[in-house]
Image (cartoon, helix red, strand yellow):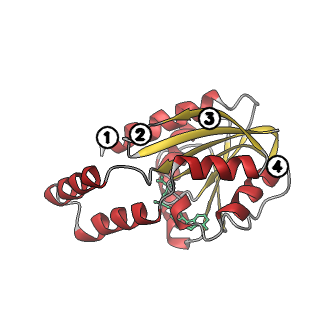
Amino acid sequence: MKKFTDLYIVLSTIIKNHTTTPHPRILDLGCGPGLLSVEILKQIPDATVIGIDPLIKMLLLAQENTKKSSVQIFEPVLGVSEKIPLKDNSIDTIVSRFSLPYWKQPHDSFLEMYRVLKPNGKIVFEALNRNFPKWKLFGIKVGMLLNHAGRDVTKYHADAYALAHTQEEVEMYFKKSGFAILEKQGTNNEWKFLIVAEKK
Ligand SMILES: C[S@@+](CC[C@H](N)C(=O)[O-])C[C@H]1O[C@@H](n2cnc3c(N)ncnc32)[C@H](O)[C@@H]1O
């Protein structure tokens, strides 16, 4: 569990470094149970984090988790990336982690992220790497089963890779939607990659 928390801490530090406005409005798109939102609010206490997810049960968990950490403002919003229920130019920073495989229309979603971001607003985008070697993925699967992660979780993980994108595909989505790419992290040998982009 500690290992997972560390991943969220590292990512929220990157978000903090790219969020320079006071009292920022940060969108966690596909927030799931809100574990990243919790860490963002710990590191940027004057932020409002808006967590969007299409599943009510995830939003309820996110609300519970953000409350437990007695963090400041978390606003759960039911919605999808393809039609973000927020106003134009209303968000300082967007973060999205591991949600892309489930987006039915990625190009529309990138245009939506562009629409809701303020000019010069940033996106910190983390995605599973479709090019991650199959033999390494198999090793992770075996490790998960040996560590009693459960068949459901292991299958969910494998299915997500089957739907995942390559870094080149994600860069193309960013560029076609008008973003400038500022930073990239990750190689084809790693299980995930990160892209930071800016609305020009
Ligand atoms: C693997 S979870 C990641 C959760 C969280 N970002 C994290 O890293 O802990 C993917 C999340 O994306 C959500 N999701 C699925 N389709 C979506 C869509 N079209 N727009 C936004 N979120 C979506 C799912 O409900 C799920 O909570």
Q: Secondary structure at mark 3?
A: loop
Say the numbered circle drawn on residue 7.
2
Q: Is mark 3 in CB contact (under 8 Å) with mark 4?
A: no
How many angstroms separate mark 3 from mark 4 (CA)? 19 Å
How many angstroms separate mark 2 from mark 3 (CA)? 19 Å
The residue at which mark 1 appears reads as 3
Residue type at tag 2: Leu
Q: Residue at x 62, y 35 (%)?
A: 45
Is residue 44 something one can see in this rendering?
Answer: no
Query: Which corner quadrant of the image does residue 5 belong to?
Result: top left
Of the image marks 4 and 2, the number of the one nearer the N terminus: 2
Say the numbered circle drawn on residue 45.
3
- Horizontal placement of 161 versus 12: left or right? left
Mark 1 nearby-residue class (10 Å; few <14, some 14–19, many ≥20): few
Tell me: residue 63, above or below residue 197: below
Q: Secondary structure at mark 2?
A: helix
Residue type at tag 3: Pro
Query: Which corner quadrant of the image does residue 92 belong to?
Result: top right
Residue 162 place in picture, x, y as percent: 41, 65
Q: Is mark 4 in CB contact (under 8 Å) with mark 2?
A: no
Q: Secondary structure at mark 1?
A: helix
How many angstroms separate mark 2 from mark 1 (CA)? 7 Å
